[in-house]
Image (cartoon, rainbow, N blue to C red):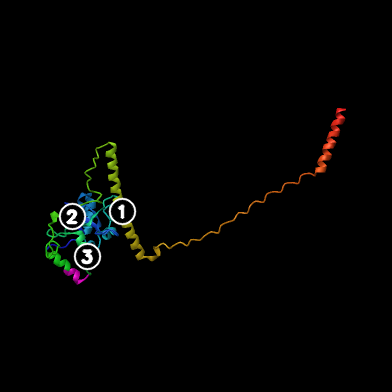
Amino acid sequence: MPHFIKHIGKHGDRKVALIYRKVPNEEHMCLVCYPESLPKMIHNGIMSVIESEPGQQAEDLADALHRNLFQDGRQMLDTLHREGMIKKVKTRDIVVTPNATSHVHLDELNKIMDGIDVGDEASKKMADLDKNSGLVDPTKNRAPLKERPMEVVEDATAVDNDVDFSDMSDTGIAKQRMHQSKKMLAEANAMIAESERLQTEAFDLDKSLKPKKKRVVRKKAVVKKKAVAHKKSPSPPKKAVKKAVKKAVKKAIKKSA
C-alpha cells in the first residue's frame, strides 16, 4: 500500500497543497496553494517540505512552511502570503489524495480528524479507511465522486465567466474592478487568519508579549476663572461740570465783547 502523504489534495483537476485544512472561525473553508502553477523554485521548496518528516508530522502545512526558507532566503509562508499565492476555498470542494488509489473530501476528513481521539482508535480508524481504498467507509452508500457538485464561491483563482478583461466599456471595467476586489478580499482574509494564529501562538509561548490593558485616567475638568471686568473710572461730579460750563460761557462773552 502506498505511503500516506499529508497536505496533498485536488481542487477540481488542479493539484493543491493544504496550507490550513480549516480556517479559524470558518471551519467550512480551507487555505490552499496550487504548486503546479507556481515558479519552479517555489514549487520545489513546498514539495520538499511536504515530503519531509517535519512536514508530515505537522498538523497544518503552514507550521512547517513557517520554519523553512526558499533557496533565495525568503521565508516560505510569508512569501506565499505576500505574492498572493494562498487561496481560500470550501473544504467540501477539496478532495484529499494521499495516494493514487485513495480520496476523500476534506470536510469529511476534518470530521474524522476532529471526532476521534488521538491514539490507537485514531490509527485504527485511519488504517481502516485507507484499507478500503478511498478513505471512505464502505458501509455508507455515497454518490460517486463525479456526481458531487463543485461549487466555488470564495476561491480567488476561480475564473469568472462574466468578466471579459478585453472589454473596455464602463460595464466591463466595473466587472473587472469587482473581480479584483473579491480577489483582494479573499487574500486579505487569509492573511488576517494567519496573523491571528501566529499572534495567539506567540502569546502562548511568551505571555509577557500579550499587551496589558491600559488604565484609563480621567483628567479633572479645569474650570477657567472668569476674567474680572475692570471698573470704570468714576465720572466727574455734576457741580464741577456746571462750574466749568459757566466759566467757558463767560470767556466766550468777553471775547465777543
Report the amino acid beneath label 2.
Lys
Which range of residues does the magenta coloring cover?
A: 118-124
Per the image, the residue denoted by label 1 is 189
- Within 10 Å of disc 1 (Cα), the crowding (few <14, some 14-19, many 20+) is some
- Mark nearer the viewer, 2 or 1: 1
Q: Position of residue 171 (x, y in %)?
A: 28, 38
Q: Is residue 83 covered in magenta?
A: no
Q: What whole-number distance in Å separates the C-alpha atoms at marks 1 and 3?
A: 24 Å
Residue 10: mark in rendering? 2
Tag 1's secondary structure?
helix
Residue 113: mark in rendering? 3
Query: Which is nearer the eye, 74 or 222?
Result: 222
Q: Position of residue 4 (x, y in %)?
A: 16, 62
Q: Quadrant of the C terminus?
A: top right
Report the amino acid beneath label 3.
Met
Q: Position of residue 28 (x, y in %)?
A: 25, 58
